[in-house]
Amino acid sequence: MKYDASTRTLQFTSDQEVDRFHAEVTALLREAVSAASHLGDAKAGKLAAQAVFRDFASVMRALNVLRRHLDRSAGENDPPPPTEEGPVGDGSEG
């Protein structure tokens, strides 16, 4: 993995490296949320867990971008799913 300063992007050497990065960052974030959720009583824990999500909003956005890539690339070599007759989409594509 390297950082390209001209485009401000991380460049991964393989999809496996992307998978590992995503899994490791997700695990770290889950651990932080879990630890925060056990602070004080249930209400305090919930507020602390919510604060983790707010404090790490950039990390969450990066994980979501990676997740979209991983979802798309997961079935690249699989045959397309069978199509069904019916309405075309719900307007959320884009």
Image: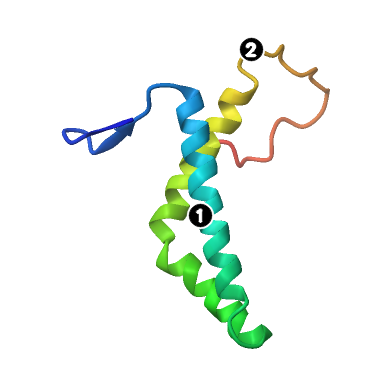
**Label 1 to label 2: alpha-carbon separation:** 30 Å
Q: Residue furthest left?
A: 6
- How busy is the neighbourhood of tag 1: few (under 14 within 10 Å), some, or many (20 plus)? few
Between disc 1 and disc 2, whose residue precedes?
A: 1
Q: Element at badge 2?
A: loop
- Residues 35 and 22: in front is 35
The x and y percentages for residue 50 are 54, 72
Instruction: Kindly identify which residue carries mark 2.
Output: 77
Amino acid type of the residue tagged 2 in the rendering: Asn
Question: For this rendering, which residue is in front, 78 or 22?
Answer: 22
Q: Residues within 10 Å of mark 2 (few under 14, many from 20)?
A: few
Residue at image position (56%, 66%) is: 33
Q: Which residue is mark 1?
A: 28
Q: How far from the left and from the top, in percent, is residue 69? A: 51, 32
Residue in view at x 50 percent, y 40 percent = 22
Q: How is the image coloured?
A: rainbow
Q: Is residue 49 left or right of residue 9?
A: right
Image quarter of the N terminus: top left
The residue at the point 68 percent across, 40 percent down is 90
Amino acid found under the numbered disc labelled 1: Leu
| Comparing labels 1 and 2, the label whose residue is closer to the camera | 1
Q: Which of the 4 image quadrants contains residue 37?
A: bottom right
Horizontal side of 71 relative to 16 (left or right) equals right
In-image side of 88 versus 45 (left or right): right
Q: Residue at x 48, y 74 (%)?
A: 51
On screen, residue 51 above or below 22 = below
| Residue 11 to residue 65: above or below | above
Q: Give x and y (percent) for residue 80.
A: 71, 15
Give the secondary structure at mark 1. helix
Left or right? Give the position of 90 relative to 94.
right
Provide residue 32's location: percent of width, then percent of height.
52, 64
Task: Using the image, tell me which numbered label, if any, was put on residue 1.
Answer: none
